[in-house]
Image (tube, coloured by chain):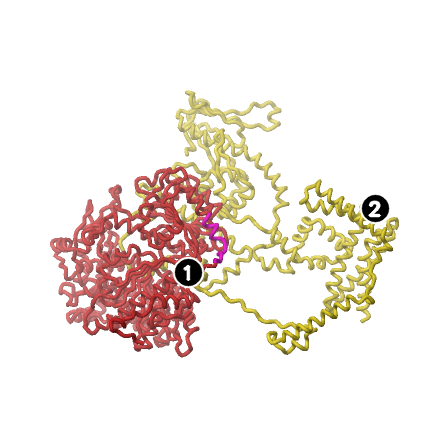
Amino acid sequence: MSHSGAALFRKSAGILTIDESKYPARIHWKSTDGTQVHTIILDQVSKLQATPANSTKMMIKLIGKLTKEEMDEGIIDPVSVFQFNNRMVMENIKNTLQIIISRYKDNVVYEQKMLKEKEHENENNMNLINTESLEDSLSVSNLLSNLQLQQNYLKQDLTLSKKFQNSVIKNKLPAKEFWITRITELRSFALSNSQKFGPYNVLSTIKPVASSDNKVNVSVTKDKLKAILATYPVVKLAFDENVPLNFHEQEFWSRFFQSNLFRKLRGELIMANTRGDIIIDKYLENEITLNSKEDEHNMNKIKVSKVLDLKGNMDDDPLKFPNKQDFTMRYGADPQGQTEGVLDILKGMNRLSEKLMNSLQNEYGRKDENKKRKQDELDNDEGFDDLVEPPKIKYTKIKIQESNLEDNLENADMNSVNLNELGNRMTAQLENIKNELLNEDRKVSLFDFEKHKAACYEANNKILNILDKNQSFINKEDSDNLSSFMNVVYDVNYKKLGIPQEVYDSCSLLNETCNEFLKHFYNHLNTLDPRRSMIIRRLNKHLVQCDVQLNEINKSFKDYDSDVEYMLKPVHQAVKMSLKKFDDCLEK
Amino acid sequence: MLFDIDEIPILFPYDKVYPEQYEYMRDIKRVLDNSDVNGNIQLNNGQNAAANSCILEMPSGTGKTVSLLSITIAYQRYHFKQTGIKKKIIYCSRTMSEIEKTLLELENLIEYRNKMLPPDEADENILGLGLTSRKNLCINEEVNSTKSGKLVDEKCRLKTNGELKTSLQDEAESKKINNSLCEFHENMYQYDVHNYIPKGVYSFDKLINVCKEKKICPYFTSRRMIDQCDIIIYSYHYLLDPKINSRVNKMLNLEDTANTIVIFDEAHNIDNVCIESLSIDLNNDILKRGNKSCNLLLKKIDNMRQVDAERLETEYNNLLQGLNAANPQKATEEDDVVPNPVLSTDILKENVPGNIRKAEHFVRFLKRFIEYLRTRLKVMHVISETPISFLKHCRQLTYIEQKPLQFCVDRLALLLRTLNIQDNNHSAIEDIQCLKDIVSFATLVATYDTGEFQLIIEPFELENQQNIPNPILHFICLDPSITMKPVFEKFHTIIITSGTISPLDMYPKILKFDPIISKSYKMSLPRQTFLPLVISKSTDQQPLTTRFEIRNDPTIVRNYGDILVRLSQTIPDGLIVFFPSYLHMENLITKWQQQGVLDKIWPHKIILTETPDAQESSVALEIFKKACDNGKGALLFAVARGKVSEGIDFSNHYARAVILIGIPFQYTESKILKARLEYLRNNHLIRENDWLSFDAMRHASQCLGRVIRGKLDYGVMILCDRRFTKRVGQLPAWIRQGMEACNSEQDVDLEVGLNRCKAFLKSMAQKDVKTNTKDLSVWDENDVKAFKAENEKPIDYSKEGGFLLQ
C-alpha cells in the first residue's frame, strides 16, 4: 500500500512519495532537511530497474525518455537512482511504480488499437429499428420511411437490389411502390437483424491474469467496456469526470481494473490490505449513494403482489414478540467475522440482476405485457388444467348447393335424401359423360403425330440431351447444391439458344422490370379505387416505356431475332394487354 | 362438476376431480358429521369433551385448498338449508401470501357456485374476508409510510381514537394537538356496518381497491364486518396468540363455538407458533428504553395532576371498584392499548392490588422491577431457572410480590388511557412499546409459574465472544399444547392439514389431542412428474455434507459449487437453492465468489438472493419471476427456515428444480433448543436426535414441496447431503412414493444424478403421450359414481334383522 518511504538520493537521506492523484503521476523526493527536492514525471520514464531480491544492495533505477531532438543533441538519458534501507519499503514502491509505468506504456498500444476498431465500428454498430417500441417500428408507415433499413436489406439481397436499381433508380418507379409489396420481407429482415446481445454480467467475464513480468493483464473488448459503462452508473460517473480531463481512456480502465471499486462491483470481499487505486476508489462512496437511490426507486416502482409479499408476511402479526433467532439464522453474525460485507455482495447480486431485467423490460414489445397484471392473480391457473375437460370441437354443418342436384337437395336435409334416386341420377350422369367421350364425331385431332414425326423425334432428343447434361453435371458436383444446378439451367438456356450472355442478361433484366411494373399496375387497377387513378396513370407511363424498350431490344438484337423475340414474347404481350386494358378503362 | 358425498351435493369448480381430492373431502365430511353428532351430545351434557379433530397430509399440488373450501362451503350451505343454523368457517393459514392465495381460490369457487346454482339458491349473499395487520391494509399514506408494523398500529390508533375526535371538536383544545383524524376512518361513519362493501369474497388486493374507491379504511372494514362473514381467513396467530386472539374473538362474536369449523392449513409448524406466542425476550436496550418511558409517564402524571387532577382521581376511584369498571374500553370496539399476553382462561378476575392503584406508585413499581431486571442481566455465565425461583428471588431482593406483577398489563393499559398521550413522535412511541414488552413479561412470568416455562439469561451471544457482553433474557414456553388447549376446548371441529406433516403421530403427541382421523394421502399421477434425487457424492466421489465440523472444508465448498454450476447448465428456467442457515449461505457465497463459481453461473442464469430486508427480497422475487417468464432463467439463493421457504409458490417454470444444500438442522448449541429438547425427553419420551431430525426433515420437505404446485407441473428435487440417505424415511409419504416410482437408488454421485435429470427433463418436455389405458389420476362424474357404487354400498344388515332406510 505504501506510496512513500525513506530513500537515499544522491547520497542524502530523504522521503520518497508517489503522487498518483495528479496527472501524470509523479515521484517527489524531498531530503530530510528540506533543502533538496527532486521530481520525476512518470510518463517520461522508459525503464525501471531494481536490484534483485537476493542482492545485498537495495536500489531502484529510473531511466527517462528523451525526445528525438534531445537525442540528436546527444543528451544522455536522465537517470535517477534511489537507495533504500528497507526491503519491504522498496518492494512496495517498486510494485507501485511498475504498475504506473506499464500503464503509461500501454497507452500508446491502446490508442492504436482503438483507431483500428473505430473503422470497424461504423459498419457493425447500427441499430436498424427501435426495439423498445416494436409494435410501432414494425408498422407499415415506419418501415416505409426507414431508409436505412431498406438500404441494408438491399445490400444483403443482391437480386432484389438489381430489381430495385432497374425499376426505381433507372425507371423512376416510386420507392414506396416498390416496398409496399414487400412489407413482410422487410419486416422479417428488420426483426432478424435487430436481435441484440442481451444484458449480462460483464464483470464476471473479465478475469485479470498475471503475466510473467509481474504485470496484470485484462483482456476486454470495446463492447465489454461499453457494457460496463451502461450497467454501472458509478463507473460512468467516474469516466465522465476523469476522461479526458485527468487521464486517457486507457489509463482510466487500467486504473479501474486495479481498483477496489472493481472488486466491489464484481462482488469480491475487499480485504483491508488489498491495494486499490486512490482516484477510482473515491467513487466507492458515490456508489453507495447511487445504490441507495436506485434501491429506493426500485422499491417504489416494482409493485409486489400480495402473494409474494414477504414483508407483508412479517407484518401480518405486529403483536408478535418471538425469541431472537440464534446466530446462524441472522445475517452478518459469523463469529470469526468472515462474512462481514457479504451482505453487500448479496445485495449487489440482486441489484445487478434487477438492472439486467429492467434493461430488458421495454425491449421487444414487453411493455404491454407488463401492463396487463394489475390485481393479484393466482400464478397456478394452468396447474389444474387436467381437471378441466378439454373443450369439445364442434362442427357446424355447411350446406353446399350443387348445381346438378339443386332442386333435389335445396330443401331437403342431407340425411333424408333418397339414396336410390341419387344413385339413379349418378348413373344417368355417368352415362351421359360416357356417351360424350365415346362419340367419334366430336373427336378433334389435336396433333397429328404422323405428319410431324421428324420434328417430334428431334424435340425428344433435345430434351433427353439437356437432361443428360444436367444429370452428369450434378453427379460431378455436389448434388445438394441447388444453386449450381440453377446455374446449369441458365447456362444451358442461353447456350442452347445460341445467344451471348450479355444479351441474355439484358433480356432477363428487362423481363423482370416489366414484371415488376405489371405487378404494381394490376395491384392498383384491380382495386377499382378512383383515388388510385393518379398512380395508375403513372404506372401506365412506365409500361409504355417498357413497351418501347421491348421494341428496342427486339430491334437491336435482330441477329438473334427469333430467339430474343421468342423469349420476350409473353411479357411483351402482357404489357400490350395491360396497355389496352388501361385504354379500355379510360374509355369507360 | 357436481357430485354427492353422502347426502351433500358438492360443487367442485373443475370438470374433473382427483381421486385423492375425493377421498380427502369424504374424510373431512366424516369429521364434520361426527362433530355434529358429538356436538349435540356435548351441548346436552353441558360439558366440553375432546374436540373432533383430524390430521391429514395431502400432497402439495393436488388442490388441497380448493377441496377444503369446496367441502366446507357445501357443508355449510347444506346445513343451513336443513337446520337454519349457519356454521361459521374459520380458515387459518400461515402467512399473508397463503391467505391471499386462499382468498383468490375462494373467489373462484364462489363464482363457480353462483354460475352453476339456480338463481334462487345462489350464494350471492356469502361474505368471505381475510384479516391482516394494519400495515398490510392501510391506505393512509401518512401512516403507512413508516416501516415497522408496530408503529403503523400505534399511529393508526392515535388517528382513529374517540378522544382525539372529541378534543378536535373543541376549538381551544384542537390548537394544542398536533394530529389529525384519518379521513378514511371518518368516512366510514357515513355507512352502516353491513353496507361498507357489498357481499362477496374479497382478496386483500381487491378489498384495498374497493375501499380506495369508496374512500374508506380497508382494515376497519374487514375488522368490523368480520362477525358477519360466513368464512374468515386469517393467520393462525390470530387464533392462538393470546395478545391478539381476545381482540379477534371479540370482533368475531363467537358465541356458538359448536357451530364453528376451524381449519389449520399449512399446520406443519403449528407447535412453533404456539410456543412463540407465549415467549418473550428482553435485553438491555429494551430495559433502558422502558425506564426512559417510565420517566416520561411520571412527567405526564405530574402535568396532569396540575391540569386535570380529577381525571387521575376518577381512575383511582374506579380501580377501587374493580378493574372492569375502571376500564371503559372493554365496552368499545377500540383495541386494547396493551394487549394481554396471557391466555384468557388464565387472566385473574380480582381487584388490582393496592400498591399499584395510584398512578405514581405503579410507575415507581415498574421502575423498581426494571432495575431488578437490569441487575439480573449483569451475569457472567448462562443462568437457567424456573419462573418460581425467579419470582422468589425477585421478592427477596425488591419486595415485589407475584400478584401485582400479574396485573401489570392491565394497569399500564389503564394508565396510558388515562394519560391519553397524543404524541406523534416515533421514538416516544417506540419507548412505550418497550415498556409494554416489559409489562407483558411481568404478567407472563407471574402467571405461568409452572414447569412448562423457563427463564434463560445468556450473558453473551456466543461462547467465543465473551469479551462482548450482550446479555439477553429469554422467557420461553416449552409446551405448545398450552396454547392449543383452549382452542380444542372451545371449538368442536378442528381440521389440521398440510402438504408435509409427517410423521403423523408426532403432532397429536406434542399438541396433546386425539384425532379421529389421521391420514396421509398418496398422489395419483398419470406419469411421474417429479424426480427426487439424493446426491451424496460429488464427481470425485467425495461425500457431500454440511456437517458443522467440516462444512468449511475447501473441497466440500468447491464440490457444492460444482454441483450448482453443472445444474444451472442443465436445468431450464427457474432454479431454487436452499441453505441450512443464513450463516452458511453467507459463507458459501463468499467462498464461491472467490473460487469463481458464481462467474460460471452468470452466463446461464441471473442470480438473486434472499436478504434480511424483507421488502428487498420480495422485489428480488418479482425479478426472479420476470426472468423466468422471459426465458433468461434465474437462480434463487434462499434459506430453508427463511422467509421464502414458507408460503411462496414456485409453480411451473418458476422452479424446475429445487436443490437442498445440506440438511436444515437447527443450531444445536442454542440454549432455548436445549431446554426444549430436555422438556420433550422428560415429558414425551422423544429423544433429542429424533426431534432434531424430525424438525430438520419437515423443513426440508417444505422446501421440496415448493417445486410441485400441480400435477401438470414437473420438477426435480435434489437433496445434496450424504446424511439424507438415512433420513429418506422421514420424508412425507408422497415424496417417498415418488422416489420408489423413479426407482432412484438412495444415493448417487453427481454425474449419475445429472444424467437422470437430463433424461427426466427431456421426457417431461415432450407432450403427454396419450395411452389407451384409462387415466386413473382424474375422475369425471361417472368415475365418481362408479367408485361410490363399488366402495360405498350401504351395509346390509338385513340378515341380522336390520332394515334399510330409503
Q: Nearer the viewer, residue B603 or B325?
A: B603
Check chain identity for marks 1 and 2: say if they share one.
no
Where is mark 2, residue-wise? A498
Q: Is residue A167 visible?
A: yes
What whole-number distance in Å separates the C-alpha atoms at marks 1 and 2? 76 Å
- Residue sitting at x 39%, y 48%: B743
Q: Nearer the viewer, residue A10 or A381?
A: A381
Name the residue type under label 2.
Answer: Gly
Q: Quadrant of the N terminus of chain A?
A: top left
Chain identity for the colour yellow used in the image? A
- Secondary structure state at the residue bearing disc 1: loop
Name the residue type under label 1.
Answer: Leu
- Seen in the image, is A177 located left or right of residue B517? right
Q: Position of residue B306 (x, y in %)?
A: 21, 67
Q: For mark 2, does the 10 Å Cα neighbourhood hold few (<14), some (14 to 19), or many (20 or more) residues?
A: few
**What label does residue B776 carry, if any?**
1
Q: For mark 1, does the 10 Å Cα neighbourhood hold few (<14), some (14 to 19), or many (20 or more) residues?
A: few
- Seen in the image, is A192 located left or right of residue B621? right
Compared with A50, A348 (above or below) is: below
Subunit of label 1: B
Query: Does the magenta run of residues contain A213?
Result: no
Query: Does the magenta run of residues contain B769?
Result: yes
- Residue sitting at x 16%, y 57%: B450
Subunit of label 2: A
For the record, the magenta segment spans B759-771
Q: Is residue A545 visible?
A: no
Chain identity for the colour red used in the image? B
Q: Position of residue A192 (x, y in %)?
A: 61, 52
